[in-house]
Each structure stands twice: as structure tokens, then as C-alpha cells.
Amino acid sequence: MNNVSESKRALALPSWLLQGVTISYILLVVLFALAAAINPHYASWDNIRNLLQIGAFIGVIAVGQTLVIITGQIDLSVPWNLTFSAILMATLMSHGTSTPVAIAAALASGTLVGMFNSIGTAIFRIHSLVWTLGTNALMQGATLVYTHAQPPKVDVPPFVRALGAGNLWGIPVPLMVWIVAAIFALVVLHQTRFGRYLYAIGNNESALFLSGVDSRKVYLGAYAISGFCAALAGIMLTGYSSQTYLGMGSDYLLVPVAAVIIGGTNIMGGSGGYLGSISGAMIVVLLQSVLSTVQIQEAGKNIIFGSIIIILLLLYGREKLSTH
């Protein structure tokens, strides 16, 4: 009898998949249908392609954010890490550095900032909410000092423009980058030992430590990937707008977090995955588009996304407490 019940549990879908991912995709379909009913233009391929292109920026950032949130932490240094990485790339190119070297430097910079974030969480045991906000302020100051509050004007090379605004066979190049990033995230989370360690930290870090795993290295990897993704998004946004500017990452403080938790990842850690973050990113983009259509100001959008995060935090927090 016990063997039968164990087999049934093994065949059953995880609760986070049923409660999080499934609901998020249903919500995406319903929201898209409502938007198309209000304005038939939403159902056109041109508009869908535009939504996917914009969603790619959020989706790439959400790769790293998902990994970090699964551990029960958060990365709020994305806005100015993204901005500094993009400006660093532009500055180097304005001084004659080749495009590949400038891009590599930007990605390395973002990754190092992510690794710095892991120091506070893994070594000093300061909650990431505080530490990464401090890092974000630090990067803001560093950017202002580095640029003298005047980002360099540079002729963005074709490769960078293609990453942010190009099309290949009628498919947005940013969407292709997002697909590659999504495959990477899904493989890492569900097919690697590192992915299992991320979930283990979110559920019970002490148990992971007692099993002989150094959680500091896991945090280091998660935050390094998050920093890399922020820098990659900065490069893509530079190509999309054909320029860099101060505060270009300001819109990406709450939005990627909202995408991850709307997709069913428990903000308290231990459950969820990137499959839900994909739908979460598109829900956020579609919601932003609808709010812009009805002329909701930026402050109103922030209130809405902040409210979503608070509500889901309360729901997931109660769920987390009930499991202990």
C-alpha cells in the first residue's frame, strides 16, 4: 500500500507547477484575450513581435533573478549594474576598443558586480534586500563619477544594434537571445547539480551545509549569473535605443521581480522555476502595454507592480510558513 502511494506521489506533478506555472499561463491567455477584445491590434503579428522583443529584455534579466530568488534571496542591484555595464561598453568603443572586447568587458563587469553581491549574502550573512540595494546605490555613484554625469555618445555598431533591435527571418534577434537564455536556465535548474543546490538552499540551507555542500559557492554562481544577465540586457538595450543614458535600467528594478513571482516562483525560496518566469515576463509586458494604452502614468505602473509583489509575497509567505 505504501509503495502504491509513493508511486502516485512520484507521478504527480509538483504543486508549484500546478499552482504557479499553470495559473500564470492561464492568466497570460486571459489577459491577451481581453487586450485583443479591447483593441484588435493586440492580436496582430507586428504587435506580438514587438511585445516579444520588449519581453526579451525582462526575460533575460529574469534568468538571473529566478536563480537568486529560488535561494530565498533577491537582486536589486540590476538597474545600475545594467546601466554601468552598458556605459562601460560604450565608453570603451568610443576610445577605439573593438566591439568584442568592449562587450566582453561589459559582461565581465556585470558578473563581478554579481559576485560582489554574493559576498554580503554568503559571507557576512546580510540579507540581500539590504546588500543589493546598497550595491545598486554604489553602482549609481560609480557611474556618475565614471561618466561625469555625461554618458559617452557613440555610434552603436551593427552587431549591438542587431542584439537589441534586429530581425532574422522575421524573428526578433532579442527573442532568439531570450530563447537561448531560457534553455540555459531550464537546463541549469532541472538538469544540473548546481540547480538542485539552489532549491536546497531555498528549502533548508542548514541541511545542505550538513550534507557537505559549500553554500557560498552556490550563492556565488547564482549572483554571478544574475550580474551577467543584467549586463547582457544592458548591451541589448543599448542596441535597442542606439545609445546609452543615465538611468537606462531604472525600469528594471521591480519588473523582473514581478515577472518571476507572477510565474509562480516562491519569493521565500525553494520552489518555482524559469518556465513560469517566461509567462510572467510576457504578462508584465502585456500589462505595461495595456496600462500605457489607457494612459496610466509611470508612478501608477509602479504602484500596480509593487502591489502585485506585496500580495504574492503575503500569499507565498503564508504557504512557506504552513510547510514548517
Image (spheres, rainbow, N blue to C red):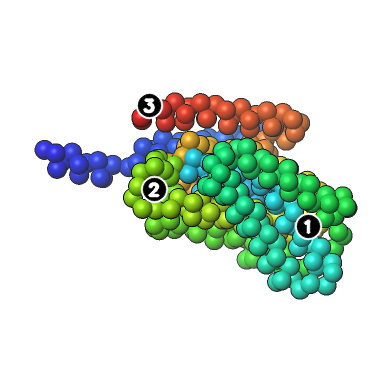
Q: Is residue 78 left or right of residue 268?
A: right
Label drawn at residue 322: 3
Q: CA distance from mark 1 to mark 3?
A: 46 Å
Q: Position of residue 111 (x, y in %)?
A: 62, 58
* Of pointers 2 and 1, the one earlier in the residue sequence: 1
Q: Of the residues shown, which amino acid type is indicated by label 1?
A: Ile
Q: Which residue is pictured at 74% across the width and 57% down the height?
A: 86
Q: Of the residues shown, which amino acid type is indicated by label 2?
A: Phe
Label drawn at residue 87: 1
Mark 2 touches mark 1? (CB < 8 Å): no
SS of the residue under disc 2: helix
Mark 2 touches mark 3? (CB < 8 Å): no
Q: Quadrant of the N terminus?
A: top left
Does 191 appear above or below 93?
Answer: above
Q: Nearer the viewer, mark 2 or mark 3?
A: 2
| Residue for badge 2 | 209
Q: Position of residue 169 (x, y in %)?
A: 62, 66
* Of pointers 2 and 3, the one earlier in the residue sequence: 2
* Of pointers 1 and 3, the one earlier in the residue sequence: 1
SS of the residue under disc 1: helix
* Residue 36 visible: no
Q: CA distance from mark 2 to mark 3?
A: 24 Å
